[in-house]
Image (tube, rainbow, N blue to C red):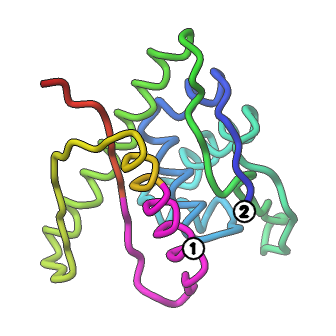
Amino acid sequence: MSESVLTNDQLRCLASPARNDVLVALRAVGPASTKEVAARVGRSPEATHYHLKALFDVGLIQVVGRRPAPKKPETIYACVSTRLKLPTDSESRELRKKAVEASIRQALRGYLAAKASNANEKQIVRTTVRLSNDDRERFFALISEALAFAETHSKADAPLCSWLSLAYPSGD
């Protein structure tokens, strides 16, 4: 499983909700053409290509091949990393905030779409807890284990499930 720390240029790119949607869709479907990603996000192939190019230019996705098509070969894109980490340097603070907000907006749109479709498999868990440093490290390790489980049990023909975890100091 490859993991990379986002650069400031990548954070700027992901601060766009549309680009965030395109990246999430590409991660979900695996290597795909512009047309396949466009169908997934509900945008035109032209708009999707614009966002794929931006993601490619900052190194978040790569070209992994070409596929024959009726008019001209289709470019196939794939994500460079399976996991992205936010940088911890102080100069990236505002960019981190925008990228996280875009991810939250994307997750909310997904949840609202699932709610509108009367999907009966929604599970919402929200809690506020006080954890010691040791417990907090174990908690994040458990989240990482759950993510690894989900990734190793993912099946291409199974229903898509989105998951967002947020952990932050809430202040008292």
Hey, what amino acid is under mark 2?
Met
Q: In what quadrant of the picture does the C terminus appear?
A: top left
The image shows residue 108 at horizontal and vertical percentages of 25, 51
Seen from the viewer's position, the closer of residues 88 and 93 is 88
Q: Is residue 142 a member of the stretch shown in magenta?
A: yes
User: With 153 as the anchor, is 6 left or right in this view?
Assistant: right
Part of the protein shown in magenta: 141-163
Residue pictured at 40% horizontal, 24% vertical? 97
The secondary element bearing badge 1 is classed as helix
The reply to whether callout 2 and callout 1 are in contact (CB within 8 Å) is yes
Relative to 7, say whether 127 is above or below.
below
Relative to 95, say whether 45 is above or below.
below
Residue pictured at 59% horizontal, 68% vertical? 36
The image shows residue 45 at horizontal and vertical percentages of 57, 55
Relative to 134, say whether 2 is above or below.
below
How crowded pointer 2 is (Cα within 10 Å; few <14, some 14-19, many 20+) is rated as: few
The image shows residue 148 at horizontal and vertical percentages of 56, 70
Instruction: Find the distance from the CA under tag 2 to the CA under tag 1.
Output: 9 Å
Hey, what amino acid is under mark 1?
Glu
The secondary element bearing badge 2 is classed as loop
Which residue corresponds to mark 2? 1
Which residue corresponds to mark 1? 151
Q: Residue furthest top?
A: 91
The image shows residue 171 at horizontal and vertical percentages of 18, 24
Relative to 161, say whether 110 is above or below.
above
Residue pictured at 50% horizontal, 75% vertical? 150
